[in-house]
């Protein structure tokens, strides 16, 4: 009798261990993911990638790419055949016809120029060339030898006056004629040196556009990434369930590293865009020699000084100096990606206090940081703060 | 029921497996399966982080082969694994750590205050 009982007990033990084993293997290895569509390409000289869910994802991506390539070909300042390249080279009084997309981007650019009090400016390409931070300077950012001198203060001031003059009569020194009936737009140059660089907000604009295209294809969940711009709708399917999109923001410091640690992360449960701008991706160091310090030159140009972010001229020293208290990065969260893109750039050029006030007054959510401080404006809840907490070494402020 | 002698004969001839044998097999089966599950679930990392005196000084992808010097250590990343090939310190202990590739594995060089740590998937959808 005792033997039979034991036999039953042992059979049970075997069955139990089998069940436990089977359950553990199922949990560990075989989550079945809903088919996600991911693809990427290069647009505007940087990464464009998507994650989408739905049968039409591939067709949607093809359409996005075709439209983005079309915009790139029209607004590029490095491609001699582009409309905006030719417009830049043309003389005062010349006019060109532009696409509906370019017209919309110009309208946004003017809107955000006035919203930011002039800090957001698309007419800075000549200053960018002067400082070797324009579209053709990628090799310097990649570490190739600095084989030029910084511009003299006279050259910089000349460009500064030119920017002020271009903006004096009408914003960016152009006249826009939009014909409602034919839906065509023409722009006319008011000054010889007007160069329009729509690249300053094209990525944000295109992120909005891509999400609209995805929606038109019946896609309910998608993520679009264009360099420092991310826009999401719906949710992400991960580990067997739909979850809110979780987006990390790279730490701008240390500056020279191959992979950045995460400063903080945010979770989005609805259509939202997050854009980061800063001095840490496209920059080079310039050794001024003598008593003058080695300064970082980044691609964000201040329209009021025609100098890069944080740089000013020291008359006594006769050299450029870098302000250690300058804003080094800004992240803006807004449903409208083109707005977030323009404002993120503008905020980087303000002083830290000015930037905080600007976001608070205009009810814009985001984070602004210097090398020592970080302020979260309108952001009260971070995603898994105990894990993604690269900001704890900074002096942290939460403003609402 | 068998009598005692019959039972002993049966066991000797291999006709009956003893209860205690079965218990041992069952326990072994459970232990082995648990070990196999834990080993196979140990996640491969995708990034190595380098800390100097506790401060993060750099992160490198395990997917890209690389070889570089940091703080007196020659750090090599190859085939998804990271190891220290040489060190300027006296004890060379970090060289004997071997290759690391699984999440939370570390190489520590005490004389140079350097910690190399493997970290895994960030759990984020994307990073901007």
Image (tube, coloured by chain):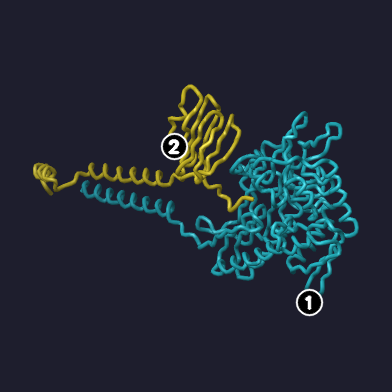
- Location of residue A190 by image quarter: bottom right
Eyeballing the image, is A361 above or below B83? below
Residue named by callout 2 = B99
How many numbered callouts?
Answer: 2
Outermost right residue: A169
Observer able to see residue A210: no
Q: Is residue A265 left or right of residue A86?
A: left
- The chain shown in cyan is which? A
Q: Which residue is painted at 67% across and 55% down in the image?
A: A229
Q: CA distance from mark 2 to mark 1?
A: 67 Å
State the hue of chain B: yellow
Eyeballing the image, is A183 above or below A169? below
For disc 1, the chain is: A
Eyeballing the image, is A145 above or below A53? above
Eyeballing the image, is A162 above or below B118? below
Residue named by callout 1 = A182
- Location of residue A313 by image quarter: top right
Q: Which residue is painted at 55% across and 27% down in the image?
A: B113
Which one is in front, A151 or A250?
A151
Percent of width and height locating residue A17: 34, 49
């Amino acid at each position: 009798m005792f033997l039979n009982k034991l036999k039953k007990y042992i059979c049970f033990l075997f069955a139990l261990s089998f069940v436990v084993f089977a359950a553990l293997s199922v949990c560990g290895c075989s989550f079945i993911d809903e088919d996600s569509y991911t693809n990427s390409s290069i647009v505007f000289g940087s990464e464009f990638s998507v994650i989408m869910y739905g049968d039409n994802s591939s067709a949607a991506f093809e359409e996005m790419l075709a439209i983005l390539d079309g915009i790139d070909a029209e607004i590029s300042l490095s491609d001699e055949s582009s409309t905006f390249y030719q417009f830049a080279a043309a003389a005062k009084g010349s006019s060109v016809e532009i696409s509906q997309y370019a017209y919309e981007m110009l309208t946004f650019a003017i809107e955000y120029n006035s919203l930011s009090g002039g800090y957001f400016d698309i007419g800075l390409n000549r200053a960018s060339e002067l400082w070797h931070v324009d579209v053709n300077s990628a090799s310097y950012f990649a570490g190739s030898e600095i084989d030029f001198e910084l511009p003299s203060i006279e050259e910089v001031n000349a460009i500064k006056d030119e920017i002020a003059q271009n903006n004096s009569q009408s914003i960016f020194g152009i006249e826009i004629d939009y014909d409602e009936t034919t839906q065509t737009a023409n722009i006319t140059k008011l000054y010889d040196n007007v160069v329009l660089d729509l690249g300053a907000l094209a990525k944000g604009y295109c992120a909005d556009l891509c999400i609209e295209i995805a929606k038109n294809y019946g896609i309910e969940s998608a993520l679009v990434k264009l360099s420092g711009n991310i826009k999401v709708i719906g949710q992400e399917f991960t580990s067997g369930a739909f979850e809110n999109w979780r987006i990390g923001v790279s730490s701008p410091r240390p500056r020279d590293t191959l992979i950045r640690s995460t400063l903080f992360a945010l979770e989005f449960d609805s259509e939202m865009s997050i854009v980061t701008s800063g001095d840490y991706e496209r920059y080079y160091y310039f050794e001024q020699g003598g008593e003058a310090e080695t300064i970082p030159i980044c691609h964000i140009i201040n329209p009021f000084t025609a100098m890069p972010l944080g740089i000013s001229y020291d008359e006594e020293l006769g050299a450029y100096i870098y302000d250690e208290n300058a804003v080094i990065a800004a992240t803006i969260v807004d449903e409208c990606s083109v707005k977030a893109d323009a404002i993120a750039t503008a905020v980087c050029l303000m002083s830290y206090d000015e930037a905080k006030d600007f976001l608070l007054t205009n009810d814009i959510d985001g984070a602004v940081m210097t090398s020592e401080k970080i302020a979260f404006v309108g952001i009260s809840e971070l995603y898994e703060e105990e894990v993604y907490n690269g900001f704890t070494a900074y002096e942290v402020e939460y403003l609402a | 029921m068998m009598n005692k002698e019959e039972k002993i004969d049966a066991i000797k001839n291999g006709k009956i497996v003893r209860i205690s044998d079965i218990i041992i097999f069952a326990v072994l089966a459970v232990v082995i399966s648990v070990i196999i599950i834990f080993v196979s679930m140990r996640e491969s990392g995708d990034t190595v982080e380098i800390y100097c005196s506790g401060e993060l000084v750099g992160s490198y992808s395990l997917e890209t082969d690389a070889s570089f010097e940091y703080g007196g250590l020659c750090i090599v990343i190859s085939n998804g694994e990271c190891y220290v090939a040489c060190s300027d310190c006296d004890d060379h202990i970090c060289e004997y750590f071997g290759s690391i590739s699984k999440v939370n594995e570390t190489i520590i060089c005490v004389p140079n205050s350097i910690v190399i740590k493997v970290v895994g998937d960030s759990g984020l959808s994307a990073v901007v």
